[in-house]
Image (cartoon, grey):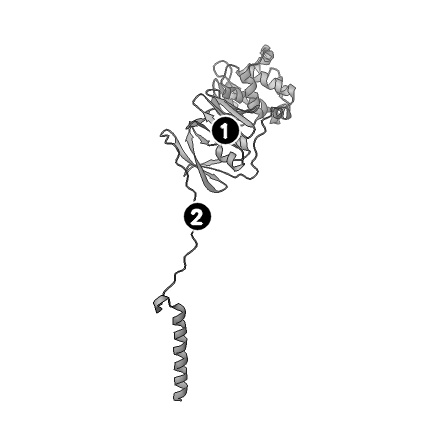
Amino acid sequence: MLRRKTARSLAVLLALALLSLCACGEGGSIRLVETTPEPTAPPPTLEPLPERPEDLSVRVYCDGLLTDRGYYRNETVYLDPALLSGELGLPLENSADEDRFRVIIGDLTVTGDAGTGYFLAGERYLFAPHGWLTVDGRAFLPADALSKLFGVEIVCAEDPLRAEFSTAGAALMNGSGLYYLDCCPDTEFYWLVHVIAAEAGNQPLAGQLGVGNVVMNRVKSESFPDTIQEVVFQNNGSAAFSPVESGEIHMVSDELSLIAAYLVLEGYNNVGESLYFVNPVVGNASWVTANRTFVVRIGDHDFYA
């Protein structure tokens, strides 16, 4: 019996000795080894933007990651085009001052002049009523202009103020003016330009754009004819547009009306579903105000849906 206990004791002591040797370092002391995770790369740091006390900072998320920062002014988010050109691997040149900017993205040149209300991208037009921001000699462009230029949807939100977009399917705009020929036959475009000029030639670009959108809304509506020319010359006892009756519809149009028509074809709409407009100072607005819903006033015209 004593031999069995002695044998068991020796076995236990031997096991403890082996465990002790496995856990010993130099000098025979026992060390507790803590495992630590492999160090991870720190998140990218964003270079601070120049201080602009008059503008709010906007966080920019690309494909879910905080990637850049922009600015907010006049209810417009302005972003650096370098962010999207970099994502597409396109070279970029960007120069700007308070009077003019020039941005070259790949083979597309985008320019703008202060006070015009639009940008020129190749041979195509972008509506930009608030222009651009000049930051350290570079142009920050409105989010909706960048959305058109790169074919992405940029969603702007608050709390915190941010802009989010995905690069899936992103592609640089084709700046060819042939785009407009594909959108609208020459004859139709001719009458769109002329009705804009005749009805709103003395109005700012935004007002001319609104009149063009009323015409296009009527073309889309089941309550009106199906083509621009038929809408312009519709007559149900009286002309739908007074310049048709006066003959002013045939007057020579100017460059701004042409640009407004191009912007209509680009899809810009600043009057919603409006089907009517009236100058309340010189026109009879009683039927419209009594039967239609007011949408917005632009320049001298009130627009109604």
Please indicate, yes or no, whether residue 15 appears anywhere in the rendered image.
yes
Three-letter amino acid code of the residue under disc 2: Ala
Q: Is residue 137 left or right of residue 221?
A: left
Residue shown at 34% from the left, 68% from the top? 27
Residue 251 vertical placement versus 35 (above, below): above
Residue shown at 52% from the left, 21% from the top? 288
Circle 1 packing at 10 Å, graded few (<14), some (14-19), many (20+), is few
Picture quadrant where residue 217 is located? top right
27 and 229: which is toward the camera: 27
Q: CA distance from mark 1 to mark 2?
A: 31 Å
Q: Position of residue 84 (x, y in %)?
A: 51, 35
Q: Is residue 304 left or right of residue 38?
A: right
Q: Disc count in the image?
A: 2
262 and 238: which is toward the camera: 262
Picture quadrant where residue 191 is located? top right
Q: At numbered mark 1, what does the secondary structure look like: helix, strand or loop? A: strand
Q: Work out which residue is located at the far front of the displayed protein and give it.
A: 26
Residue 276 vertical placement versus 248 (above, below): below
Q: Position of residue 110 (x, y in %)?
A: 52, 26
Residue 30: give its label.
Answer: none
Q: At numbered mark 2, what does the secondary structure look like: helix, strand or loop? A: loop
Please indicate, yes or no, whether residue 223 appears anywhere in the rendered image.
no
Q: What is the quadrant of the N terminus in the image?
A: bottom left
Q: Position of residue 247 (x, y in %)?
A: 60, 10
Circle 2 packing at 10 Å, graded few (<14), some (14-19), many (20+), is few
48 and 295: which is toward the camera: 48
Q: Position of residue 153 (x, y in %)?
A: 52, 35
| Label pair 1/2, CB-CB below 8 angstroms | no
Three-letter amino acid code of the residue under disc 1: Glu
Q: Which residue is mark 2?
A: 41
Q: Earlier in the sequence, mark 1 or mark 2?
A: 2
Q: Which residue is mark 1?
A: 93
